[in-house]
Amino acid sequence: MDKQELASILDEIAVFLELKGENVFKCNAYRNASRTIANLEQDLNDFHTPADLSQIKGIGSSLAEKIYSFIQTGHFPLYEELKAGIPTGIVEMLRIQGLGPKKARTLHEKLGIASIGELEYACRENRLLEIPGFGEKTQENILKGIEYLKKSQGRFHLHEAKAAAGNLYEDLSRLSFVKHIEIAGSLRRYKETIKDIDLLITTTKPEKVMEAFVSHPLVEDTIARGKTKSSVRLSSGINADLRVVSDEEFPFALMYFTGSKEHNILMRGRALKQGYKLNEYGLFRRDSNKSKALESEAEIFAELGLSYIPPELREDQGEIDAAEKKAIPKLVQFKDLRGLFHLHTPYSDGLPSIQDYVDYARKRDWEYIGISDHSQSAYYANGLSLEKIERQIREIDSINGKIGGFRIFKGIESDILPDGSLDYPDNILALFDFVIISIHSKFKMTRDEMTGRIIRAMQSPYATMLGHPTGRLLLGREGYQLDMEAIIKSAAANHVAIELNSHPYRLDLDWRYIRRAIEAGVLISVNPDAHRLENMEYAELGTGIARKGWCEPRHILNAQSARQAQEFLRRKHAQ
Ligand code: DGT
Ligand code: CA
Ligand code: ZN
């Protein structure tokens, strides 16, 4: 029985109970239990009786009975009953940013709204103003939330699409009659969200490949099946297209289907100017229907007078001009990273111990790590008291004293309080090697207020890195209003590095601004924001996004040696 599955059932029960208007304590009990189960070290199968389960802090005896029966039977009757009793449209409404169970219940009770569509209509008719406690502002925010949801619908997080595509790639490339196979499209370009997966194959047996593709275990539905192209829907809801092309066409098809569309249009225009026609089938001299024989994308670029453009840069951001001038940067690679900052431990809301992180990092040949738990104001994330800070620092000093050739940096992720001050007095902040400053509360300030708040925080001599700068959650929540240009400028002036938070839901700073930041002289830190060991690998996604931001190793704080990184952090303190 899977802990995560149980945790999400408990969490959903909490939501259902709130939708029904049950009392807060009961709802919170389920919500807390969900978190406890998700972070449990033991396996569910290690609990042999309900009494064993009720030993867990925060799990009472009646809940322990229910969980035990779930482990035994795979059923959670309360969950099933609640779920059946609540219209699914109301649950879907909760995906709207800023609309919690309480408001959703009121909307249902007062206006009979039971779906996102109905809610949108009601907002446009100004109906929400009739309800006590709902104002113009709430209605406007709900509409904005709905618009955002519609815009992002049908897209998926990068890591999810990447995992599915990787799985298809592996299984298909194992077939003896598959010669070349590549993942193209937005996934190859490392876009932060993905609409669908594009696979390209050359093969001697197209029909067999198509058969293997549509009958792959990840596939739920076949949308279209043909000789050269098939489309399927995976069980995760992501669509995948597979195209079979000839060996001669392969590099041209790869270039075309990698995109982006905007980049392709520019490339085609360039080819035309040079007397060529460029498309997915080849590169043709005018008046000829036989393509130039070229072996690779690099050769196509070269034929058009360009150096190779890595897929991440193919976004119509000046890459073709740069390639013409042979000025494409030597982009950072995942293996260039030498250490990782922003790791959470059980001192706040992370799972792995400091030693766990050290062991994992050393196995991966990283040279240093930076621990940064939440600060005291982040009570929901178990933020650190002064006593815990002291204890953690002692633990780090002790491990640092014992290991050679590796370094643990002491840090904290300090909340930026609404007035722009940090979460501890200076004498406490001075204990750390680095301080990540992040916003975790009061998201709804005006653009000027928020910009001022962050700039004020960056002016602290102890602020070394700005954490997840926009606060966005991809496909979930738009970032707060702020003037990013002003923030970048101030980061440069105050020697603050900007985090590229590599959590797949964040990928924040956005790559479009990363390029602006490094041009302004700001260092980027590719941080996993890890709460589990395997989250350290998020830095691979972050590196892809850094590449999209035109970053070379010299632009990345954690692509530097421990000594260089320390030098940067110290210079800031010494200011
Ligand atoms: P997405 O939305 O995440 O799936 O993004 P892409 O870039 O994978 O877009 P997709 O799957 O619609 O198409 C794959 C590539 O095919 C795209 O990046 C460029 C190429 N392509 C598609 N439609 C057009 C088009 O109308 N003109 C040109 N020049 N290229 C196109
Ligand atoms: Ca695609
Ligand atoms: Zn954070």
Image: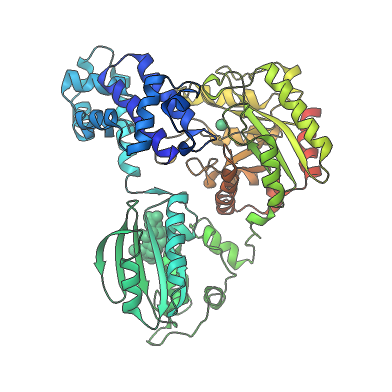
- Give residue 266's position: percent from left, percent from top: 45, 65
Residue 184: name its quadrant: bottom left
Residue 486: name its quadrant: top right
Q: Is residue 420 visible?
A: yes
Q: Residue furthest left?
A: 112
Nearer to the camera, 147 or 58 = 58
Q: Quadrant for the N terminus, please.
A: top left
Residue at 48 percent of width and 77 percent of height: 274
- Give residue 351's position: percent from left, percent from top: 58, 34
Quarter of the image where ligand 3 sits: top right
Q: Quadrant for the C terminus, please.
A: top right
Image: 270 above or below 488: below
Nearer to the camera, 42 or 208 = 42
Residue at 21 percent of width and 32 percent of height: 84
- Give residue 521's position: percent from left, percent from top: 68, 43
Residue at 36 percent of width and 15 percent of height: 24
Nearer to the camera, 171 or 62 = 62
